Structure formats: C-alpha cells, structure tokens
Image (cartoon, coloured by chain):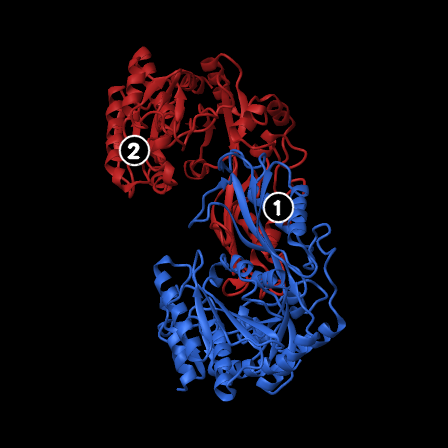
Chain colours: A blue, B red
Amino acid sequence: MTPELEKLFEFLRFPSISTDAAHAGDVKACAEWLVKTAEELGLSAQLHETPGHPVVIAQNEHQDGRPNVLIYGHYDVQPVDPLNLWDSSPFEPEIRGEKIWARGATDNKGQMLAHLLGAGRTLREKGDLPVNLTFLFEGEEEIGSPSLAPFLRENRELLKCDVIAVSDTGMVAPGMPTLGYGLRGITCGEVVVKGPTKDLHSGIFGGAVANPAAALARLITSLHDEDGKIMIDGFYDDVEPLKDWEREMWAKVPGVGTDDYLEVTGAPSLFGEAGYSAAEQTWARPTAEVNGMGSGYQGPGSKTVLPAEAMAKFSFRLVPQQDPKDIIAKVEAHLKKHCPPGVTIEFTPGHDGKPYHADPHAVFGKAAQRALKKAFGKDPVLIREGGSIPIIEDFRTILGADTLLLGLALADAQIHSPNENFPVENFEAGIRLNQALLQELADS
Amino acid sequence: MTPELEKLFEFLRFPSISTDAAHAGDVKACAEWLVKTAEELGLSAQLHETPGHPVVIAQNEHQDGRPNVLIYGHYDVQPVDPLNLWDSSPFEPEIRGEKIWARGATDNKGQMLAHLLGAGRTLREKGDLPVNLTFLFEGEEEIGSPSLAPFLRENRELLKCDVIAVSDTGMVAPGMPTLGYGLRGITCGEVVVKGPTKDLHSGIFGGAVANPAAALARLITSLHDEDGKIMIDGFYDDVEPLKDWEREMWAKVPGVGTDDYLEVTGAPSLFGEAGYSAAEQTWARPTAEVNGMGSGYQGPGSKTVLPAEAMAKFSFRLVPQQDPKDIIAKVEAHLKKHCPPGVTIEFTPGHDGKPYHADPHAVFGKAAQRALKKAFGKDPVLIREGGSIPIIEDFRTILGADTLLLGLALADAQIHSPNENFPVENFEAGIRLNQALLQELADS
C-alpha cells in the first residue's frame, strides 16, 4: 500500500459523523489530524472553531503575482445506518477488488484528501506550488453547512481567491474526466389539505364530504401535464434554453439515460419532460417532485376512514435564471388557485438555494479542461449537475469567485448508503488532477 | 332513577371490550349478566360459547300461529382510548344533562337493552308477548363478528324468523323516528405504485425518473371527474336509480346536509357528486374514497428524495345492485389501464360486503312505521344508511329474513369516541318502541 493510501486509511478511520452529537469528539479529532497532516506536507494549517464543528485552513506561502486558488472539501461523513447492510465495517477501510470500501471513501474524504496529497506531492517534487493555494475543509457539509457562510464572511481576506475547485460531484463514467459548470437550485414547500376536523366514518359521511387525500392527489396531478411538463403559471419564464453545444456534448455523454442508469435506479423505465434527454432533464430542466405525502390510515389492513387531512412535501429543482423565491410564490399561487372544493389548504415554504452556472469556456474553465485531460489522458466532458450545493452559490456571493466542479464520484459509489466505495484509481487520478490543475491555473 | 335505568347502568359497568384479550373475562361476565337479566324478565336464556366471545340467546315461549321475530344486538364495546379525553369514567355511567354518559351507552348497550326491557315490561304488564321472540346478542360486533355467520348457519332452527329488528343505526334528529331500509355495501383494495428500487436523490435523478407519489396522485385523480362522478368504466352499470318517493322524503329529512351536519363534520363546505343531495350522496350513491395514502418522507422538515414507492388504501361504498366482486375487478382494471409511464402497480383486493335493501312499504315495514309513530308520536322518516353492516346481509342469506333498522343513535352520540352518550329519552323511547313493534308485527 502506498504511503498516500495509508494516509487515506488513517483519515477514513475517524467516525466523523457530523449529525450525531456523540461523535463530536471524533469530528474534532479528525480536524486535528488534518491540521497535522497538512503541516507534515509542508503547508501551514490552523483549526478554526465555529459554533459547530471546526473549519481547517491550510495554505502554502503566498506570493504576489500568482493566482489565488481555493480548494474546498469536507471531512465530515453521513451516518452509517443500517449497519447490518455493510459488507465490511464502515470505519475500518479495506481494499476489495479495485476499490476502497468505507464511509466517506468517496463523499468526501477520498476526493478532498487527493487534492491535499496532490499539493504535498508537488511540494515534495518541486519544493513549491505554482499558485497561492488555500484549502478550506469544513466538518458540517452533511448537516447543511450552517457555520460555513458566516465563516466565509468573517474571513474574506484569509480566503481571497480568483477561482475555487471542488471535487464533491460525479463523473459520468469510470475514467471519463468530467467538468461540472452548473448546479440546479432548489426550493421546497409543504402543503396540508384540510377537510373535516377529524377522521370521519367513510360510510356515514362518504359522498357528501370532500376527501382531503383525493383533493391533494388532484393538486399534485395539476402540477404536470401527461408529458411531464410543469403546468404552474410562469414556471418556465426565466429558464435559459439549452445551448446547442450542450445538447451536442451531452448526447455523447455515457451513463445518463442508458441501461446502466436504469439499473442504478431500478426504475422500470425512464420518464420525464417530453422533448429532452435524461441528461437534459436532470441537468438543465427544472422539476416539481413530491418528496413525501401522507394521509389517513397507513397501517396494516384497512380502516375505512375519510381522512381529516392530507400532507405533501414538495421540492423544485431550479435552473438558471429561475429565482427560488419567485418560484415558490408561483407554486403557492398555483396550489391556491387549484384547491378543489370542500377543503382548505395551508402552504409553508421551506429552504431554498439558487441555481449555479459558470462558463466552462472562460479562462479557468479551459485550464480545468486541460488539467482533466492531463490527469485522465482524454478530453473531459462538460456537464451540469442535477443536485444542489448551496455553498457554491455562497462562494460566488461572498468570495466573488466561480467554482470548478471536478467530480471523482462514480454512480455506484453508494454515498449516503451502506457499502460506500471509491476506486483506488480515482484516488490516484485525484492526486494527479490536483498537480495538473494547479499548474494549468498558474499558466492560464 | 327508574329500575330500568338502574339495569342499564349495571350493563354499562362491564368493560366488555371485545378487541382486547385482557378484557375477555369482562366480556364473558357481561354475557352471563345478560342471561341472568333475561331470565329475571321472564325469558328463557342461554349462553352459547363460540370460538370467540359468547352469543346469548333469550326467548319467550313460542306458540304456533304467531310471527317469529328476531331482535339482534351486541353487548361488546369499542376500546376507550384516549382515556384522558373523557369527561367521566367510561365504565362508571352517569347522567349529566339529559343524557347517559358511558362507553356503549348508544353503541349498542343502550339500544339493545331497551328492546330486552321492552319485552320485560310487556311480559310484566300482560303476562305474555304477542309474537314468538328471539333475542340474539353477540359479543364480537366491534371486531367484525367473526363467529356470527357460523353461529347462524349452525342454529338456523333455533333462530328461525320471519323478520328481524335491529337498533344499531342512527335517527336523523332528536325525537324524529327513523326507519332504515337500506345499507351501502363495501369493497376495499390497496394499490402500491413502484418506481425505483430505493429512494433516489431528487437532484441527481429528478426529472428523468417517474415519481411514484405523483403517479399515484394521477391514479387517484383519475377515479373522479371534477364534479365528483366516478370515472371507472362500468362503475354505475348496476346502480338502481333513486325512486321519486325517496327523493321527496329525503328532501324533508332534517340533519343531513344542513349547517348542523357541517358542524358535526367540521368540513369547510360540502362536496359530492353533482346532481344529488347530501342524503342521496351518502345513502343511495356509491363512492370511491381514499382511506389512507403514504409515500416517501413524512417526518419533520424536508428530505429531498424521489420516493421508491407510494401506497393508497381505497374503499368503495356500494348501493343496490352493485356487486362487490364485480366492482373491485373494475377498479383493478381501471388502475392498470391508467397506470402512468415509468412505474408499475400492484393491486390487492380487501374485504367486502354486499349492499342491503328492503322494501319499507312491505307488510313488516309498514308495521315498523306504525310502531315508530306510536313510540315517538309522529310519522317516521324512511331512510337508508351510508354505512355497511355485513351481518344484515348475512341474516338475509342465512336466515332468509329482512331486517328493520330502527336506529336510536343521534349524530352527536360519540360512538367509538370519548364521551359516548345516549339520551335518557331515547332509552325510554326504545322500550316503548319494542312494545309497539311486537304488537304491530303481531297485528300485521
């Protein structure tokens, strides 16, 4: 095992589960290990306390005239339940086949440590880095990064940067270098449909009193037409059309929309907005999803009630230039306008985050493409991501820099699930990628 | 307090909760008390063991040439949870205002004991009854009467009858005598809509994979048009149209569909199949109700999953001459025909029971009308019931007799809920009703 893999194994052994107060000490110990490791590599590093888990900053010696590059990662991990579905202990990493198996192997310890060790390797080989580098590692990503935006605001000078790089997203297929230049935004809400004040006998009252579950179903159905188009007034008003080059490139991207993709999801067939490919549907088109719904009796057998109320939780993935506040207002107006007779509705907006989009053909985007080609030996694909990473928009707003999304996660990485894994090759490629990236950014 | 009220209080003190094994002894003791009480009144009575709780039979001495009358009731009661919502202890009956407050006061101890004591009063006053009377009291009504149909089949001779009377339904308003001559049937089913094999990340996959909750909503919505009409092919094929006399009489019935009714339900407004009144909708028109549904994340806050599946429980109230097996087959065909793309469905039929309907203008119906007028001093209304009492259909099938539904339960009786109550006047009226009924049946 290489010394770099040994370092990764050390890192993976910390059960740094940020959501579980019982693991707060492990999170802290993991942060301290990061400080020590960065220092051993030749960087200066400090642990910064926050109201939650610590932030770790590591930097080389900055010099005038070099680009300022910030690399972000997170050292906290998801919980491991259900433990019995793991084939090996989540915090005792092991290599089976050509993969590292452990909680955090992909998300995000493997990816972030590759960057740190890449900088270490360059320092070892050349005694210097070609850029002014700042690593920003947080321990609260899996709980929504509550301390990060305040930390960014309070440390603008320390964190000043021209460009940001993050490896916490996906690559479209093994060995296929992937540059992400967009993320969908999100806005959420919950609706409660209220009918009678208590569950009624469906025999005595059924037929004369509206059924809140059926009314909610009608509301949900009103959100889409049969071809998957969203029917909320004005929902698409600010959606930027796909560019021709995007549609052409995405048509060649492996993975998304193929039989493999079907196998990963287990869905019987794909279904989405007519006129768009699966890649286009998930990366560049907005959605209206039901994340949960409930009404009446859900236990075994039957209970013939007419339920008093019904609830649904929605999330809407947004694309440039949709605004979350504007969209959630349109959603609420739609639900109120379509409220069926005999019930009332209450709507509560939830959290949100703006969509993100940067030009992959700008100077730093081109540098990232060259670095990806160097590290993987082939031209990268340029994609957007379907998910939402609100901190990327915070980086732009607070630090004023765009983010290069250099994902190393594969579709079968099982992040957030039992048997999380990361190919050894992706770890090695991540180290090479960091070296190439810093050089290309310096040369651009 | 009258001796008859004292008897009712004794009866109500038994916590004869049939669903709770811990109360099996109380159920048995209650049955034994019934045997003793019937004997004290001058009837012969026996306790019959069943695989579940006992059946009690009480009879006068039968003579040739008299009509054979069977009166059914149940001495078991619903559980009392949540106990903290009761204003007085459920098994320590008391009179407050003009009502008796206790579990079982209306459902069914108050109503059934009025019949037994009515027969006792006639025996006391006249030394004889005008009919051959058989009381059939079961202790399993609240758990679906599993032992009753077998008992009927094994005791056809003992239970032979020309007509059956039951007081276990509603009267439309206080003091308004009510003859029920129909019940809706029922058929139930559950559908599971399946999409991906596990909950998916709604950012990564949302847009390209069908959402089972939205698909289920579309299926539920397909069951009705916007005017509340059921859209299942052939659903109304066998529905008997309302008779003119029914529509005329029901238009005058108090309670159903009025502001009082709205207040009882707490619904913001009424809604049902266009073209029918609330009474017609609940008594003579079939329904398709969602009794429960569930999908995805239903806890606090948000979890932005694309759910793997969604479930709904349905019940369909049926009217003459709809057949439950035919209807559930049509439901299944409808759901399969309307299954949206990208998901599969699994359908499981549930329990069922046929609708019941008898002619209230036949000989025994007319006798019941005269008896109700005698007991209450005004002409009765003739109604059907929206609920389903499968044993009534069993009586017809196994014993070959129609049932007169002589309901004494008021809308605010709180049956199955805390603070169950029964007006003292309804108890007294029930005793008078039994006396008048037996005489009118004898004279008819």
Q: Amino acid at mark 1?
A: Phe
Q: Is residue B378 above or below residue B295?
A: above
Q: Residue at x 59, y 80 (%)?
A: A437
Q: Position of residue A109 (x, y in %)?
A: 46, 73
CB within 8 Å, label 2 to label 1:
no
Tags 2 and 1 both on a single chain: yes
Q: Which residue is mark 1?
A: B235
- Which residue is nearer to you in this view: B8 or B166? B8
Q: Which tag is nearer the camera, tag 2 or tag 1?
A: 2
Chain letter for mark 2: B
Residue B121 in percent (x, y) is at: 33, 15
Disc 2 residue crowd, few under 14, some 14–19, many 20+, Cα 10 Å: many
Which image quadrant: the C terminus of chain A?
A: bottom right
Q: Is residue A33 visible?
A: yes
Q: Is residue A66 above or below residue B278?
A: below
**Residue found at x 61% / y 27%:** B246
Left or right of A103? Residue B362 is right
Number of numbered discs present? 2
Name the residue nearer the viewer: A318 or B291. Answer: A318
A189 displayed left or right of B6: right
Crowding near the residue tagged with mark 1, few <14, some 14–19, many ≥20 C-alpha atoms within 10 Å: some
Instruction: Say which residue label 2 marks.
Output: B16
Q: CA distance from mark 2 to mark 1?
A: 40 Å
- The quarter of the picture where the N terminus of chain A appears is bottom left
Relative image position of residue A124 (x, y in whole percent): 47, 86
Mark 2 and mark 1 lie on one chain; the one further toward the N terminus is 2
